[in-house]
Amino acid sequence: MSEHAFDAAIALTGGTDNIFHGHTSPAYANMVGPFGGITAAQALNAVLQHPQRQGDPVALTVNFCAALADGPFDVTARPARTNRSTQHWVVELAQGGATVMTATAFTALRRETWRATEHTLPAVPAPADVPRPEGRGRVEWINRYEMRFVEGGFPAVWDGTDHGVSRSQLWMRDNPPRPLDFASLTAMADVFFPRIWRRRASPVPIGTVSMTVYFHADAAQLRTTGTGYLLGQAQAQAFRNGYFDQTAQLWNEAGELLVTSHQVVYYKE
Amino acid sequence: MSEHAFDAAIALTGGTDNIFHGHTSPAYANMVGPFGGITAAQALNAVLQHPQRQGDPVALTVNFCAALADGPFDVTARPARTNRSTQHWVVELAQGGATVMTATAFTALRRETWRATEHTLPAVPAPADVPRPEGRGRVEWINRYEMRFVEGGFPAVWDGTDHGVSRSQLWMRDNPPRPLDFASLTAMADVFFPRIWRRRASPVPIGTVSMTVYFHADAAQLRTTGTGYLLGQAQAQAFRNGYFDQTAQLWNEAGELLVTSHQVVYYKE
């Protein structure tokens, strides 16, 4: 069995003195540079592979400073503070000595407590009852995901209509399927196409500048979710003076909220 | 006229070689260490005062690594990447050489574009029609804010009832009033008492570990908002294995969404 494209893309070497080496992946190419979700997963993977790491990821913030050039990059992952059961990380990606991403991460040893999902899975049809789009994606990374849109799919026409709402809902998983882990959850938190395209049916230039991912899922839930679908929901709250935000949720088919995420995105016009 | 407690609290000295010096403020004391919002504002203030800063804040993420001890601290604010009209910052607070907070910030020169508030101001009574709580706060920083709860006020009884919902809505402003700016907006994004106390009416130990603030407001909106009230709304999406999240919005009385914010919080039991 050959290696999954996602595993090949996030692979890092090195790791001594906090420095890891990676390479952009043509399989996850976007219009300019790679899909942001894969770069975020690479940043997290440096923490996951770090010999001093303790616990699982709870929070990750990545800041996209510049489009990555196709080619190698270095990731520096430094444990800034290690407490008894928690750890804070400062991460930086560089190409040719210039910073292309900054990030912070928080990992923790988790134990069972009282629990509740307050933002519950919306009433949506099952994945099998939602058609899978035909044809190939306009950019390569789109082909790495199976996306079945329940609501708010990619605009069929760019007629500039203000739809008044930017919400999308879709069932998603890796294509081909791959057992879920923290790295793939990170990438999936960035799968949503830009909310301003959804809201205005206008393909204005955009670029994510910062994304935060909160991992509610623990390792046991990742195992039981396996290669099942996730229901992703994303919606903007405000668009103003060149930046809009997006709030997103990812549930598994059992209705467990695995991830909540937020990002702020540059837009032109 | 004497200096406002908020200005005194966030004051920093130094600034050469990216290093600023600050001091915790008894006026913003919490149960253990200072109110997190004031520490976040101090971290942002190092960016705001930095001689190389360009543009206004769009995104800020702060990670609380340890409770601050009463006393001095150092803030290091480094411009990791400066583009034509945007800038990425890496910030760290330390006491006695140990990291107590890590942060990243994004600033940008903003220009007018198409705009929309998609998450609109909820239907709530005007500030004057909502009673102001009597008595002093249990911790000192509470007295630095005027908080008029529309919904989901501080639990009157700790009877452990699961209320099934964690949402709070309140009109807030500095006490005494102070014209709004990016630093005070940052602190106000952290004003909400822990969602798990609201949901379960149980005072379990808690601590914010990471908070992200997206600034939709520009300088002109801050000026017109002035010393007016902000409507704050906060709600958790999931509680699991020691951590819950909170999503929050701050609107001005004109219904403009000035800030969206998110945080992840440790809880015990």
Image: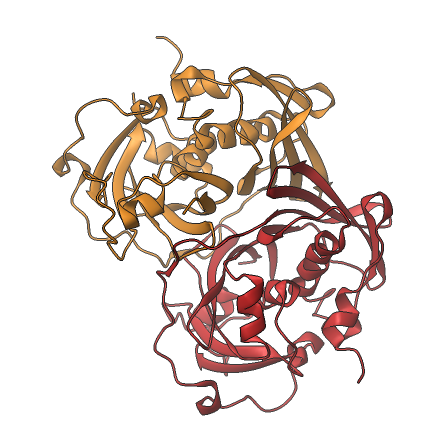
Chain colours: A orange, B red
Query: Is residue A215 in view from this perspective?
Result: no
The answer to which quarter of the image holds residue A110 is top right
A227 vs B230, nearest the viewer: B230
Q: Residue A120 in the image: state x and y as whole percent.
A: 31, 55
**Rendered residue at 59%/68% (across/down):** B188
The answer to whether residue B118 is left or right of residue B241 is left
The answer to which quarter of the image holds residue A87 is top right
Q: Residue A82 in the image: state x and y as whole percent.
A: 71, 41
Query: Is residue B179 in view from this perspective?
Result: yes
Q: Relative to residue A262, is residue B41 depicted above or below?
A: below
Q: Residue A218 in the image: state x and y as whole percent.
A: 46, 41
**Rendered residue at 57%/69% (across/down):** B222
**Rendered residue at 21%/44% (across/down):** A159
The answer to whether residue A217 is left or right of residue B96 is left
The answer to whether residue A168 is left or right of residue B213 is left
- Please identify the quadrant where the N terminus of chain A is shown: top left
Q: Relative to residue B40, is residue A91 depicted above or below?
A: above
**Rendered residue at 36%/73% (across/down):** B122
Q: How many numbered marks are there?
A: 0
The answer to whether residue A148 is left or right of residue A197 is left
A117 vs A92, nearest the viewer: A92
Q: Residue B38 in the image: state x and y as whole percent.
A: 69, 65
